[in-house]
Image (cartoon, grey):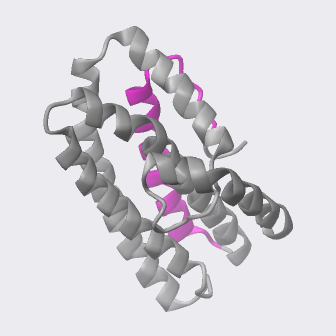
């Protein structure tokens, strides 16, 4: 099962919060994996979930929040800055040996930033979306997010944080990422 397959009948906020919980679990599983192969597999799942999750937020959630919520543009600017930093960190980690102390240090820094970012989203963005939008609209947004994730790149692409950049670069990046994934996907043992 892919890491993005969170089964819920709830709204987009619940869906994204469940993904945040899965991201937390994956960070712990990468750190605690007993073998290199298991660590690679969990890191692959983590990287993929982070990439598709952030792309969907950038394409669907952030633009809607920016339009619907007073001071939304300022809040989203801060979230996009955090996302770009995380993408750079994630791309940097991929160049490091997974069993090295350097990987552990970089993973811990990424984890701290990503989890702080998730907290900011949940408290500053998601709660306000839930209060501003009708339940049926939140359910429609969940459908849109799931569609965006299905089409999203599966690897980090620093500098591609806006909805328009994702729509322009995303399809090509997604195609290339999925080809790389097919060639280099760790095998579960």
Q: Which residue is located at x 44 percent, y 42 percent?
A: 57
Q: Is residue 6 visible?
A: no
Q: Which of these two is toward me, 181 or 165?
A: 165
Q: Is residue 141 magenta?
A: no
Q: Position of residue 83 (x, y in %)?
A: 38, 60
Q: Which quarter of the rendered picture does the C terminus lie within?
A: bottom right
Residue interval drawn in magenta: 5-34
* In the image, residue 99 above or below residue 90: below
Q: Is residue 22 magenta?
A: yes
Question: Is 109 on the left-hand or right-hand side of 127?
Answer: right
Residue 85 appears in which quarter of the rendering?
A: bottom left
Q: Which residue is located at x 60 percent, y 66 percent?
A: 43
Question: Is 179 on the left-hand or right-hand side of 12?
Answer: right
Q: Position of residue 11 (x, y in %)?
A: 43, 20
Q: Which of these two is toward me, 147 or 99?
A: 147
Q: Which residue is located at x 59 percent, y 27 percent?
A: 7
Q: Which residue is located at x 72 percent, y 62 percent?
A: 177
Residue 112 appears in which quarter of the rendering?
A: bottom left
Magenta span dominant secondary structure: helix
* In the image, residue 70 above or below residue 109: above
Q: Position of residue 155 (x, y in %)?
A: 62, 63
Q: Position of residue 133 (x, y in %)?
A: 29, 17
Residue 106 appears in which quarter of the rendering?
A: bottom left
Q: Is residue 41 visible?
A: yes
């Amino acid at each position: 099962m892919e890491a993005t397959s969170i089964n819920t009948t709830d709204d987009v906020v619940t869906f994204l919060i469940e993904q945040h919980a899965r991201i937390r679990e994956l960070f712990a599983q990468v750190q605690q994996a007993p073998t290199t192969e298991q660590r690679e597999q969990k890191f692959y799942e983590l990287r993929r979930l982070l990439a598709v999750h952030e792309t969907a937020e950038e394409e669907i959630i952030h633009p809607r929040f920016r339009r619907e919520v007073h001071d939304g543009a300022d809040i989203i600017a801060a979230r996009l800055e955090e996302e770009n930093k995380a993408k750079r960190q994630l791309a940097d980690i991929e160049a490091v040996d997974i069993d090295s102390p350097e990987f552990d240090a970089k993973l811990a820094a990424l984890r701290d930033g990503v989890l702080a970012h998730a907290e900011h989203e949940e408290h500053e963005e998601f709660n306000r979306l839930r209060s501003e939008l009708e339940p049926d609209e939140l359910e429609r947004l969940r459908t849109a997010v799931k569609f965006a994730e299905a089409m999203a790149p599966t690897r980090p692409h620093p500098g591609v944080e806006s909805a328009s950049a994702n729509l322009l670069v995303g399809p090509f990046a997604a195609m290339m990422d999925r080809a790389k994934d097919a060639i280099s996907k760790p095998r579960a043992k």
